[in-house]
Image: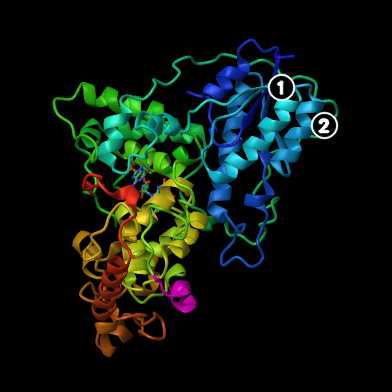
Protein backbone atom coordinates (compact mmCIF):
# COMPACT_ATOMS: atom_id res chain seq x y z
CA UNK A 1 0.00 0.00 0.00
CA UNK A 2 2.78 2.44 0.94
CA UNK A 3 4.01 2.20 -2.62
CA UNK A 4 1.03 4.36 -3.66
CA UNK A 5 1.78 7.85 -2.46
CA UNK A 6 0.09 11.22 -2.57
CA UNK A 7 1.92 14.53 -2.54
CA UNK A 8 -0.50 17.18 -1.31
CA UNK A 9 0.75 20.59 -2.46
CA UNK A 10 -0.54 23.64 -0.57
CA UNK A 11 2.36 26.02 -0.16
CA UNK A 12 5.73 24.56 -1.20
CA UNK A 13 4.79 24.96 -4.88
CA UNK A 14 8.15 23.80 -6.15
CA UNK A 15 10.24 20.82 -7.16
CA UNK A 16 13.59 21.96 -5.72
CA UNK A 17 14.32 21.32 -2.04
CA UNK A 18 10.90 19.85 -1.35
CA UNK A 19 11.25 17.24 1.42
CA UNK A 20 7.56 16.27 1.27
CA UNK A 21 7.80 15.56 -2.47
CA UNK A 22 11.04 13.71 -1.88
CA UNK A 23 9.39 11.48 0.75
CA UNK A 24 6.42 10.91 -1.52
CA UNK A 25 8.48 9.75 -4.49
CA UNK A 26 10.87 7.51 -2.53
CA UNK A 27 10.01 3.82 -2.93
CA UNK A 28 6.67 4.64 -4.57
CA UNK A 29 5.30 2.84 -7.58
CA UNK A 30 2.67 5.48 -8.13
CA UNK A 31 2.61 9.11 -7.07
CA UNK A 32 -0.46 11.36 -7.14
CA UNK A 33 0.55 15.06 -7.00
CA UNK A 34 -2.54 16.94 -5.85
CA UNK A 35 -3.61 20.53 -5.35
CA UNK A 36 -7.06 21.35 -3.96
CA UNK A 37 -8.54 24.71 -4.93
CA UNK A 38 -10.04 25.93 -1.65
CA UNK A 39 -13.17 28.09 -2.16
CA UNK A 40 -12.32 29.89 1.09
CA UNK A 41 -9.59 31.76 -0.76
CA UNK A 42 -10.88 31.75 -4.32
CA UNK A 43 -14.60 32.36 -4.60
CA UNK A 44 -15.42 35.94 -5.69
CA UNK A 45 -16.77 38.11 -2.90
CA UNK A 46 -19.49 40.38 -4.25
CA UNK A 47 -19.14 42.87 -1.40
CA UNK A 48 -15.33 43.11 -1.33
CA UNK A 49 -13.93 46.60 -1.85
CA UNK A 50 -11.83 45.48 -4.84
CA UNK A 51 -11.83 42.33 -7.02
CA UNK A 52 -10.97 39.11 -5.24
CA UNK A 53 -12.35 36.77 -2.61
CA UNK A 54 -13.04 37.92 0.94
CA UNK A 55 -9.55 36.79 1.96
CA UNK A 56 -7.44 37.21 -1.17
CA UNK A 57 -7.20 40.02 -3.68
CA UNK A 58 -7.22 39.13 -7.35
CA UNK A 59 -3.46 39.74 -7.71
CA UNK A 60 -2.65 36.99 -5.24
CA UNK A 61 -5.15 34.60 -6.79
CA UNK A 62 -3.56 35.24 -10.19
CA UNK A 63 -0.10 34.69 -8.67
CA UNK A 64 -1.28 31.35 -7.27
CA UNK A 65 -2.73 30.24 -10.63
CA UNK A 66 0.55 31.11 -12.37
CA UNK A 67 2.48 29.20 -9.72
CA UNK A 68 0.25 26.14 -10.24
CA UNK A 69 0.68 26.32 -14.01
CA UNK A 70 4.44 26.44 -13.61
CA UNK A 71 4.40 23.54 -11.16
CA UNK A 72 2.26 21.50 -13.54
CA UNK A 73 4.76 22.15 -16.39
CA UNK A 74 7.67 21.04 -14.19
CA UNK A 75 5.81 17.89 -13.13
CA UNK A 76 5.01 17.10 -16.76
CA UNK A 77 8.69 17.35 -17.63
CA UNK A 78 9.23 14.65 -14.99
CA UNK A 79 6.55 12.38 -16.47
CA UNK A 80 3.81 13.41 -14.05
CA UNK A 81 1.28 16.27 -13.76
CA UNK A 82 -0.66 18.26 -11.21
CA UNK A 83 -4.05 16.80 -10.30
CA UNK A 84 -6.34 19.73 -9.54
CA UNK A 85 -9.51 19.31 -7.54
CA UNK A 86 -11.86 21.81 -5.96
CA UNK A 87 -13.71 21.93 -2.65
CA UNK A 88 -13.15 21.84 1.07
CA UNK A 89 -9.69 20.21 1.26
CA UNK A 90 -10.67 17.92 4.16
CA UNK A 91 -13.69 16.56 2.25
CA UNK A 92 -11.77 16.23 -1.01
CA UNK A 93 -8.78 14.50 0.60
CA UNK A 94 -10.97 12.10 2.59
CA UNK A 95 -12.59 10.99 -0.65
CA UNK A 96 -9.57 10.64 -2.92
CA UNK A 97 -7.29 9.06 -0.32
CA UNK A 98 -9.80 6.21 -0.18
CA UNK A 99 -10.69 6.08 -3.88
CA UNK A 100 -7.07 5.98 -4.98
CA UNK A 101 -6.05 3.56 -2.22
CA UNK A 102 -3.27 5.82 -1.02
CA UNK A 103 -0.85 4.26 1.45
CA UNK A 104 1.43 7.23 2.09
CA UNK A 105 0.40 10.88 2.31
CA UNK A 106 3.06 13.60 2.25
CA UNK A 107 2.64 17.32 2.76
CA UNK A 108 4.68 20.18 4.14
CA UNK A 109 4.14 21.23 7.76
CA UNK A 110 2.22 24.50 8.01
CA UNK A 111 2.11 26.63 11.15
CA UNK A 112 -0.89 28.87 10.37
CA UNK A 113 -3.95 28.29 12.59
CA UNK A 114 -6.31 27.56 9.67
CA UNK A 115 -3.84 25.09 8.19
CA UNK A 116 -3.15 23.43 11.54
CA UNK A 117 -6.85 22.82 12.01
CA UNK A 118 -7.31 21.53 8.43
CA UNK A 119 -4.23 19.33 8.62
CA UNK A 120 -5.11 17.77 11.95
CA UNK A 121 -8.47 16.68 10.49
CA UNK A 122 -6.74 15.14 7.46
CA UNK A 123 -4.18 13.43 9.70
CA UNK A 124 -6.93 12.02 11.88
CA UNK A 125 -8.70 10.63 8.83
CA UNK A 126 -5.43 9.14 7.55
CA UNK A 127 -4.69 7.56 10.92
CA UNK A 128 -8.13 5.92 11.07
CA UNK A 129 -7.63 4.66 7.51
CA UNK A 130 -4.17 3.26 8.18
CA UNK A 131 -2.44 5.73 5.87
CA UNK A 132 1.10 6.73 6.73
CA UNK A 133 1.56 10.51 6.98
CA UNK A 134 4.86 12.34 6.46
CA UNK A 135 4.76 16.01 7.34
CA UNK A 136 8.26 17.54 7.09
CA UNK A 137 9.19 21.12 7.98
CA UNK A 138 10.43 23.03 4.96
CA UNK A 139 8.53 26.29 4.67
CA UNK A 140 10.88 27.88 7.20
CA UNK A 141 14.60 27.60 7.87
CA UNK A 142 13.98 26.03 11.27
CA UNK A 143 11.29 24.11 13.08
CA UNK A 144 9.62 26.76 15.30
CA UNK A 145 8.80 24.09 17.92
CA UNK A 146 12.49 23.08 18.13
CA UNK A 147 13.55 26.67 18.77
CA UNK A 148 11.00 27.07 21.56
CA UNK A 149 12.03 23.74 23.04
CA UNK A 150 15.70 24.75 22.94
CA UNK A 151 14.69 27.80 24.95
CA UNK A 152 13.21 25.64 27.70
CA UNK A 153 9.68 26.00 26.35
CA UNK A 154 9.82 29.81 26.40
CA UNK A 155 9.43 32.02 23.36
CA UNK A 156 12.52 33.89 22.21
CA UNK A 157 11.02 37.37 22.07
CA UNK A 158 13.94 39.21 20.57
CA UNK A 159 15.81 38.68 17.35
CA UNK A 160 19.05 38.43 19.32
CA UNK A 161 17.77 35.66 21.55
CA UNK A 162 16.29 33.91 18.52
CA UNK A 163 19.63 34.01 16.68
CA UNK A 164 21.45 32.68 19.72
CA UNK A 165 19.18 29.63 19.72
CA UNK A 166 18.82 29.06 16.01
CA UNK A 167 22.28 27.96 14.82
CA UNK A 168 22.59 26.93 11.17
CA UNK A 169 19.50 25.77 9.28
CA UNK A 170 19.41 22.31 7.67
CA UNK A 171 20.94 22.21 4.20
CA UNK A 172 18.49 22.08 1.29
CA UNK A 173 18.06 18.84 -0.65
CA UNK A 174 20.71 18.87 -3.36
CA UNK A 175 19.28 16.07 -5.49
CA UNK A 176 17.49 16.94 -8.71
CA UNK A 177 15.10 14.51 -10.41
CA UNK A 178 15.00 13.21 -13.93
CA UNK A 179 11.64 11.51 -13.43
CA UNK A 180 8.91 10.99 -10.86
CA UNK A 181 6.81 7.84 -10.36
CA UNK A 182 3.80 7.76 -12.71
CA UNK A 183 0.31 8.67 -11.57
CA UNK A 184 -1.83 5.64 -10.71
CA UNK A 185 -5.40 4.81 -11.66
CA UNK A 186 -7.67 7.82 -11.12
CA UNK A 187 -10.69 5.54 -10.96
CA UNK A 188 -12.81 7.77 -13.19
CA UNK A 189 -12.33 10.78 -10.91
CA UNK A 190 -12.65 13.91 -12.99
CA UNK A 191 -9.67 16.26 -12.89
CA UNK A 192 -9.91 19.98 -13.48
CA UNK A 193 -7.42 21.86 -15.54
CA UNK A 194 -5.86 24.80 -13.76
CA UNK A 195 -8.53 27.47 -14.15
CA UNK A 196 -7.87 30.94 -15.49
CA UNK A 197 -8.77 33.89 -13.33
CA UNK A 198 -11.81 34.46 -15.58
CA UNK A 199 -12.94 30.85 -15.14
CA UNK A 200 -12.90 31.42 -11.39
CA UNK A 201 -15.59 34.03 -11.94
CA UNK A 202 -13.49 37.18 -12.16
CA UNK A 203 -14.85 38.29 -15.48
CA UNK A 204 -14.64 42.07 -15.40
CA UNK A 205 -10.89 42.45 -15.01
CA UNK A 206 -8.54 44.40 -17.18
CA UNK A 207 -5.38 42.34 -17.72
CA UNK A 208 -3.20 45.38 -17.20
CA UNK A 209 -4.55 45.73 -13.67
CA UNK A 210 -2.39 42.79 -12.60
CA UNK A 211 0.76 42.94 -10.57
CA UNK A 212 3.99 43.00 -12.63
CA UNK A 213 5.29 40.00 -10.64
CA UNK A 214 4.57 36.62 -12.23
CA UNK A 215 4.09 33.55 -10.05
CA UNK A 216 5.95 30.23 -10.15
CA UNK A 217 9.12 28.39 -9.26
CA UNK A 218 10.81 29.15 -12.61
CA UNK A 219 10.28 32.87 -12.12
CA UNK A 220 11.46 32.60 -8.49
CA UNK A 221 14.69 30.87 -9.45
CA UNK A 222 15.45 33.28 -12.24
CA UNK A 223 14.73 36.26 -9.95
CA UNK A 224 17.01 34.75 -7.33
CA UNK A 225 19.73 34.18 -9.92
CA UNK A 226 19.46 37.76 -11.08
CA UNK A 227 19.80 39.10 -7.52
CA UNK A 228 22.73 36.81 -6.70
CA UNK A 229 24.57 37.77 -9.89
CA UNK A 230 25.13 41.20 -8.40
CA UNK A 231 27.56 40.06 -5.72
CA UNK A 232 28.38 43.56 -4.60
CA UNK A 233 24.71 44.35 -4.03
CA UNK A 234 24.19 41.12 -2.07
CA UNK A 235 27.26 41.56 0.14
CA UNK A 236 26.49 45.25 0.82
CA UNK A 237 22.76 44.76 1.43
CA UNK A 238 21.82 46.62 4.57
CA UNK A 239 18.26 47.03 5.80
CA UNK A 240 16.79 49.50 6.58
CA UNK A 241 18.88 51.37 4.03
CA UNK A 242 17.35 51.28 0.55
CA UNK A 243 14.96 53.45 -1.37
CA UNK A 244 11.28 52.65 -0.74
CA UNK A 245 10.25 54.80 -3.70
CA UNK A 246 12.25 52.79 -6.27
CA UNK A 247 9.61 51.04 -8.34
CA UNK A 248 11.15 50.48 -11.76
CA UNK A 249 13.88 48.47 -10.10
CA UNK A 250 12.86 47.80 -6.49
CA UNK A 251 15.59 48.18 -3.87
CA UNK A 252 15.05 44.68 -2.44
CA UNK A 253 14.73 41.23 -4.03
CA UNK A 254 10.91 40.98 -4.31
CA UNK A 255 11.23 37.32 -3.47
CA UNK A 256 8.62 37.54 -0.70
CA UNK A 257 5.64 36.31 -2.78
CA UNK A 258 7.73 33.33 -3.95
CA UNK A 259 8.68 32.51 -0.37
CA UNK A 260 5.06 32.93 0.69
CA UNK A 261 3.82 30.28 -1.76
CA UNK A 262 6.99 28.23 -1.40
CA UNK A 263 7.93 28.67 -5.07
CA UNK A 264 11.33 29.34 -3.55
CA UNK A 265 12.82 27.39 -0.67
CA UNK A 266 14.06 29.69 2.11
CA UNK A 267 16.81 27.14 2.89
CA UNK A 268 18.03 27.18 -0.69
CA UNK A 269 17.92 31.00 -0.72
CA UNK A 270 19.86 31.09 2.55
CA UNK A 271 22.49 28.67 1.26
CA UNK A 272 22.94 30.69 -1.95
CA UNK A 273 23.46 33.86 0.10
CA UNK A 274 26.03 32.09 2.25
CA UNK A 275 27.84 30.89 -0.87
CA UNK A 276 28.07 34.45 -2.19
CA UNK A 277 29.24 35.88 1.15
CA UNK A 278 31.76 33.10 1.81
CA UNK A 279 33.86 34.17 -1.15
CA UNK A 280 33.56 37.92 -0.47
CA UNK A 281 36.19 39.94 1.37
CA UNK A 282 33.56 41.59 3.50
CA UNK A 283 29.83 41.45 3.77
CA UNK A 284 27.00 42.70 5.96
CA UNK A 285 25.59 40.41 8.67
CA UNK A 286 22.25 39.76 10.42
CA UNK A 287 20.08 41.56 11.32
CA UNK A 288 20.71 43.91 8.37
CA UNK A 289 21.99 41.49 5.69
CA UNK A 290 19.81 39.57 3.25
CA UNK A 291 20.33 36.36 5.22
CA UNK A 292 19.33 38.44 8.23
CA UNK A 293 15.98 39.16 6.51
CA UNK A 294 15.33 35.44 6.18
CA UNK A 295 16.08 35.09 9.86
CA UNK A 296 13.53 37.85 10.61
CA UNK A 297 11.05 35.71 8.72
CA UNK A 298 11.81 32.71 10.90
CA UNK A 299 11.78 34.87 14.02
CA UNK A 300 8.19 35.93 13.32
CA UNK A 301 7.20 32.38 12.43
CA UNK A 302 8.54 31.12 15.74
CA UNK A 303 6.89 33.78 17.86
CA UNK A 304 3.60 33.46 15.97
CA UNK A 305 3.63 29.68 16.32
CA UNK A 306 4.09 29.89 20.09
CA UNK A 307 1.60 32.70 20.82
CA UNK A 308 -2.13 31.97 21.17
CA UNK A 309 -4.22 34.72 19.53
CA UNK A 310 -1.12 36.18 17.87
CA UNK A 311 -3.41 37.83 15.29
CA UNK A 312 -5.54 39.64 17.87
CA UNK A 313 -5.08 42.40 20.41
CA UNK A 314 -7.32 40.75 23.00
CA UNK A 315 -6.09 37.52 24.43
CA UNK A 316 -2.61 38.04 22.98
CA UNK A 317 -0.17 38.16 25.85
CA UNK A 318 2.47 39.88 23.71
CA UNK A 319 0.21 42.73 22.67
CA UNK A 320 -0.26 46.06 24.42
CA UNK A 321 -3.93 46.86 24.97
CA UNK A 322 -4.53 50.17 23.23
CA UNK A 323 -7.97 51.86 22.96
CA UNK A 324 -7.81 52.40 19.19
CA UNK A 325 -10.65 54.42 17.76
CA UNK A 326 -13.24 53.24 15.26
CA UNK A 327 -13.57 55.40 12.19
CA UNK A 328 -14.85 53.65 9.11
CA UNK A 329 -14.48 56.72 6.90
CA UNK A 330 -10.84 57.29 7.75
CA UNK A 331 -10.10 53.58 7.36
CA UNK A 332 -11.70 53.57 3.90
CA UNK A 333 -9.78 56.70 2.88
CA UNK A 334 -6.53 54.99 3.94
CA UNK A 335 -7.39 51.71 2.22
CA UNK A 336 -8.37 53.38 -1.03
CA UNK A 337 -5.45 55.83 -1.13
CA UNK A 338 -7.54 58.93 -0.45
CA UNK A 339 -5.93 60.41 2.66
CA UNK A 340 -4.74 63.55 0.86
CA UNK A 341 -1.11 62.69 1.69
CA UNK A 342 0.42 61.72 -1.67
CA UNK A 343 3.21 59.58 -0.16
CA UNK A 344 0.67 57.50 1.79
CA UNK A 345 -1.85 57.35 -1.04
CA UNK A 346 0.73 56.32 -3.65
CA UNK A 347 1.82 53.42 -1.44
CA UNK A 348 -1.76 52.27 -0.94
CA UNK A 349 -2.40 52.48 -4.69
CA UNK A 350 0.76 50.42 -5.27
CA UNK A 351 -0.64 47.87 -2.82
CA UNK A 352 -3.95 47.77 -4.68
CA UNK A 353 -2.36 47.56 -8.12
CA UNK A 354 0.76 45.50 -7.51
CA UNK A 355 0.18 43.70 -4.21
CA UNK A 356 3.74 44.52 -3.19
CA UNK A 357 5.50 47.56 -1.71
CA UNK A 358 8.94 48.14 -0.23
CA UNK A 359 9.38 47.43 3.46
CA UNK A 360 9.77 51.10 4.45
CA UNK A 361 6.71 52.01 2.40
CA UNK A 362 4.82 49.44 4.49
CA UNK A 363 6.28 51.08 7.59
CA UNK A 364 4.98 54.48 6.47
CA UNK A 365 1.38 53.46 5.85
CA UNK A 366 1.19 51.18 8.89
CA UNK A 367 2.47 53.92 11.15
CA UNK A 368 0.10 56.46 9.56
CA UNK A 369 -2.96 54.25 10.11
CA UNK A 370 -2.14 53.37 13.70
CA UNK A 371 0.00 55.32 16.16
CA UNK A 372 1.18 58.01 13.72
CA UNK A 373 -1.96 59.80 12.55
CA UNK A 374 -5.29 58.02 12.44
CA UNK A 375 -5.14 55.96 15.65
CA UNK A 376 -7.00 53.06 14.02
CA UNK A 377 -6.34 49.49 15.14
CA UNK A 378 -3.52 47.52 13.53
CA UNK A 379 -5.99 44.65 13.12
CA UNK A 380 -7.85 46.65 10.44
CA UNK A 381 -4.62 47.48 8.63
CA UNK A 382 -3.53 43.86 8.89
CA UNK A 383 -6.78 42.72 7.27
CA UNK A 384 -6.25 45.07 4.32
CA UNK A 385 -2.65 43.91 3.83
CA UNK A 386 -3.63 40.27 4.35
CA UNK A 387 -6.10 40.48 1.51
CA UNK A 388 -4.17 42.59 -0.96
CA UNK A 389 -0.50 41.63 -0.61
CA UNK A 390 0.74 38.97 -3.01
CA UNK A 391 3.22 38.00 -0.28
CA UNK A 392 0.53 38.05 2.44
CA UNK A 393 1.85 35.84 5.18
CA UNK A 394 0.02 35.21 8.44
CA UNK A 395 3.02 35.20 10.80
CA UNK A 396 5.03 37.97 9.13
CA UNK A 397 2.13 40.28 8.49
CA UNK A 398 0.74 40.08 12.01
CA UNK A 399 4.24 40.33 13.50
CA UNK A 400 5.06 43.46 11.53
CA UNK A 401 1.72 45.12 12.30
CA UNK A 402 2.27 44.44 15.99
CA UNK A 403 5.71 46.01 15.61
CA UNK A 404 4.73 49.07 13.60
CA UNK A 405 1.79 49.93 15.84
CA UNK A 406 4.07 49.72 18.90
CA UNK A 407 1.80 47.00 20.22
CA UNK A 408 4.65 44.54 20.62
CA UNK A 409 8.38 44.05 19.94
CA UNK A 410 9.05 47.79 19.41
CA UNK A 411 7.89 50.52 21.76
CA UNK A 412 9.36 53.83 20.62
CA UNK A 413 6.01 55.40 19.85
CA UNK A 414 7.57 58.88 19.77
CA UNK A 415 9.31 57.92 16.55
CA UNK A 416 6.73 58.68 13.85
CA UNK A 417 7.21 58.59 10.09
CA UNK A 418 6.29 61.92 8.53
CA UNK A 419 3.85 61.37 5.65
CA UNK A 420 5.50 64.39 4.00
CA UNK A 421 9.24 64.46 4.56
CA UNK A 422 9.95 60.70 4.67
CA UNK A 423 9.13 60.09 1.01
CA UNK A 424 10.68 63.43 -0.04
CA UNK A 425 14.03 62.35 1.41
CA UNK A 426 14.27 59.50 -1.10
CA UNK A 427 12.44 60.93 -4.08
CA UNK A 428 12.51 64.75 -4.06
CA UNK A 429 11.02 64.94 -7.53
CA UNK A 430 8.09 62.72 -6.55
CA UNK A 431 8.43 60.27 -9.46
CA UNK A 432 6.93 57.45 -7.40
CA UNK A 433 3.94 59.59 -6.43
CA UNK A 434 3.44 60.75 -10.03
CA UNK A 435 3.49 57.13 -11.26
CA UNK A 436 0.92 55.77 -8.83
CA UNK A 437 -1.16 58.95 -8.58
CA UNK A 438 -1.28 60.27 -12.15
CA UNK A 439 -3.71 62.98 -11.01
CA UNK A 440 -0.63 64.68 -9.47
CA UNK A 441 1.68 64.09 -12.41
CA UNK A 442 1.94 67.78 -13.34
CA UNK A 443 2.20 69.13 -9.80
CA UNK A 444 5.52 70.98 -9.38
CA UNK A 445 7.98 69.15 -7.19
CA UNK A 446 7.83 71.89 -4.51
CA UNK A 447 4.23 70.85 -3.80
CA UNK A 448 4.15 67.18 -4.74
CA UNK A 449 4.19 65.95 -1.13
CA UNK A 450 1.90 68.75 0.15
CA UNK A 451 -0.30 69.67 -2.81
CA UNK A 452 -2.83 71.48 -0.59
CA UNK A 453 -0.20 74.20 -0.06
CA UNK A 454 0.04 74.93 -3.80
CA UNK A 455 -1.50 78.31 -4.73
CA UNK A 456 -4.76 78.04 -6.75
CA UNK A 457 -3.02 79.17 -9.96
CA UNK A 458 -0.48 76.33 -9.66
CA UNK A 459 -3.22 73.80 -8.94
CA UNK A 460 -5.05 74.98 -12.02
CA UNK A 461 -1.97 74.77 -14.18
CA UNK A 462 -1.30 71.26 -12.85
CA UNK A 463 -4.91 70.26 -13.69
CA UNK A 464 -5.39 69.20 -10.12
CA UNK A 465 -7.61 71.23 -7.84
CA UNK A 466 -7.22 70.06 -4.27
CA UNK A 467 -10.58 69.17 -2.78
CA UNK A 468 -11.96 68.38 -6.25
CA UNK A 469 -9.44 66.27 -8.19
CA UNK A 470 -7.40 65.10 -5.23
CA UNK A 471 -8.52 65.11 -1.58
CA UNK A 472 -7.48 67.55 1.11
CA UNK A 473 -5.58 65.87 3.98
CA UNK A 474 -7.96 63.84 6.15
CA UNK A 475 -6.09 65.00 9.27
CA UNK A 476 -3.48 67.62 10.03
CA UNK A 477 -0.31 65.58 10.57
CA UNK A 478 1.15 67.99 13.15
CA UNK A 479 -1.78 67.92 15.54
CA UNK A 480 -2.87 64.32 14.76
CA UNK A 481 0.56 62.89 15.53
CA UNK A 482 0.75 64.88 18.77
CA UNK A 483 -2.62 63.52 19.84
CA UNK A 484 -1.54 59.97 18.89
CA UNK A 485 1.56 60.25 21.08
CA UNK A 486 -0.59 61.48 23.96
CA UNK A 487 -2.99 58.54 23.56
CA UNK A 488 -0.13 56.05 23.26
CA UNK A 489 1.46 57.48 26.40
CA UNK A 490 -1.80 57.12 28.30
CA UNK A 491 -2.30 53.55 27.06
CA UNK A 492 1.25 52.55 27.97
CA UNK A 493 0.85 54.07 31.42
CA UNK A 494 -2.34 52.13 32.07
CA UNK A 495 -1.13 48.73 30.93
CA UNK A 496 2.37 47.52 31.47
CA UNK A 497 4.10 44.99 29.29
CA UNK A 498 2.89 41.56 30.19
CA UNK A 499 4.98 39.34 32.42
CA UNK A 500 6.33 37.32 29.56
CA UNK A 501 8.29 40.32 28.42
CA UNK A 502 9.86 40.98 31.81
CA UNK A 503 13.58 40.40 31.86
CA UNK A 504 13.88 40.20 28.10
CA UNK A 505 16.81 42.05 26.64
CA UNK A 506 16.23 45.37 24.87
CA UNK A 507 15.28 45.02 21.26
CA UNK A 508 17.61 45.71 18.47
CA UNK A 509 15.16 47.57 16.25
CA UNK A 510 17.25 47.54 13.08
CA UNK A 511 15.28 45.87 10.31
P1 LIG B 1 13.97 41.45 0.97
O1 LIG B 1 14.45 42.66 1.69
O2 LIG B 1 14.61 41.11 -0.32
O3 LIG B 1 14.11 40.26 2.01
C1 LIG B 1 14.17 38.87 1.63
C2 LIG B 1 13.11 38.12 2.38
O4 LIG B 1 13.27 38.26 3.79
C3 LIG B 1 11.70 38.62 2.12
O5 LIG B 1 11.24 38.10 0.91
C4 LIG B 1 10.96 38.11 3.34
O6 LIG B 1 10.61 36.75 3.22
C5 LIG B 1 12.01 38.25 4.43
N1 LIG B 1 11.79 39.52 5.15
C6 LIG B 1 12.24 40.74 4.79
N2 LIG B 1 11.86 41.66 5.71
C7 LIG B 1 11.18 41.00 6.65
C8 LIG B 1 10.53 41.38 7.86
N3 LIG B 1 10.52 42.63 8.30
N4 LIG B 1 9.91 40.44 8.57
C9 LIG B 1 9.91 39.16 8.17
N5 LIG B 1 10.50 38.72 7.04
C10 LIG B 1 11.12 39.63 6.29
N6 LIG B 1 6.42 40.29 4.46
C11 LIG B 1 5.83 39.21 3.93
O7 LIG B 1 6.51 38.36 3.35
N7 LIG B 1 4.48 39.04 4.05
C12 LIG B 1 3.68 39.95 4.68
O8 LIG B 1 2.46 39.73 4.77
C13 LIG B 1 4.30 41.12 5.20
N8 LIG B 1 3.54 42.07 5.83
C14 LIG B 1 4.16 43.19 6.33
C15 LIG B 1 3.38 44.16 6.99
C16 LIG B 1 3.98 45.31 7.49
C17 LIG B 1 3.14 46.33 8.21
C18 LIG B 1 5.37 45.50 7.34
C19 LIG B 1 6.03 46.73 7.87
C20 LIG B 1 6.14 44.54 6.72
C21 LIG B 1 5.57 43.37 6.23
N9 LIG B 1 6.33 42.36 5.61
C22 LIG B 1 5.70 41.26 5.08
C23 LIG B 1 7.80 42.36 5.71
C24 LIG B 1 8.58 42.99 4.55
O9 LIG B 1 8.09 44.27 4.28
C25 LIG B 1 8.54 42.14 3.30
O10 LIG B 1 8.91 40.82 3.58
C26 LIG B 1 9.52 42.68 2.25
O11 LIG B 1 9.27 44.02 1.98
C27 LIG B 1 9.40 41.84 1.00
O12 LIG B 1 10.20 42.32 -0.02
P2 LIG B 1 11.49 41.54 -0.50
O13 LIG B 1 11.18 40.14 -0.79
O14 LIG B 1 12.06 42.35 -1.59
O15 LIG B 1 12.40 41.62 0.80
Viewer-nearest residue: 102 or 164: 164
Look at the image and tell me whether residue 352 can be seen: no
Give, as a single range, the part of the protein colored magenta. 323-333
Left or right of residue 456: residue 15 = right
Which residue carries the number 1 mark?
A: 131
Place residue 56 in its image quadrant: bottom right
- Toward the top, the furthest residue is 27
Viewer-nearest residue: 43 or 103: 103
Viewer-nearest residue: 362 or 423: 362
**In the image, the residue with mark 1 has its CB under 8 Å from the nearest atom of ligand 1:** no
Disc with the residue nearer the chain's start (1 vs 2): 1
Q: How many marks?
A: 2
Near mark 1 (Cα within 10 A), the count class, few <14, some 14-19 or many ≥20, is many
- On the image, the x and y values in percent for residue 495 come to 33, 64
- On the image, the x and y values in percent for residue 165 come to 30, 30
Which residue carries the number 2 mark?
A: 189
Measure how far apart labels 1 and 2 are at the Cα level.
20 Å
Residue displayed at 29% across by 47% down: 251
Residue 293 among magenta residues: no
Amino acid sequence: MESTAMMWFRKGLRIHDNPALDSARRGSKHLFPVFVLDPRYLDPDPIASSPGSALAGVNRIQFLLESLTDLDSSLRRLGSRLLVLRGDPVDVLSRILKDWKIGKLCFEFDTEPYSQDRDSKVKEFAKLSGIKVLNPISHTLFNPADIIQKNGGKLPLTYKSFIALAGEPPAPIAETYSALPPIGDLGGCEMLSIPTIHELGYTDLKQKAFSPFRGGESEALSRLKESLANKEWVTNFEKPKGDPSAFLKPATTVLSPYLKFGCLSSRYFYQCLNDVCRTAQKHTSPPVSLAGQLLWRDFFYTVAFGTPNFDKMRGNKLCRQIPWRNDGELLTAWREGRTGYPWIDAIMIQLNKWGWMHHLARHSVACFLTRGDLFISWEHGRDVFERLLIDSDWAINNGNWLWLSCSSFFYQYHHIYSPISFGKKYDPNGDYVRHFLPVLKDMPKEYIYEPWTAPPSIQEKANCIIGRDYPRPVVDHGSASKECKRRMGAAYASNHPSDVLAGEEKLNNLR
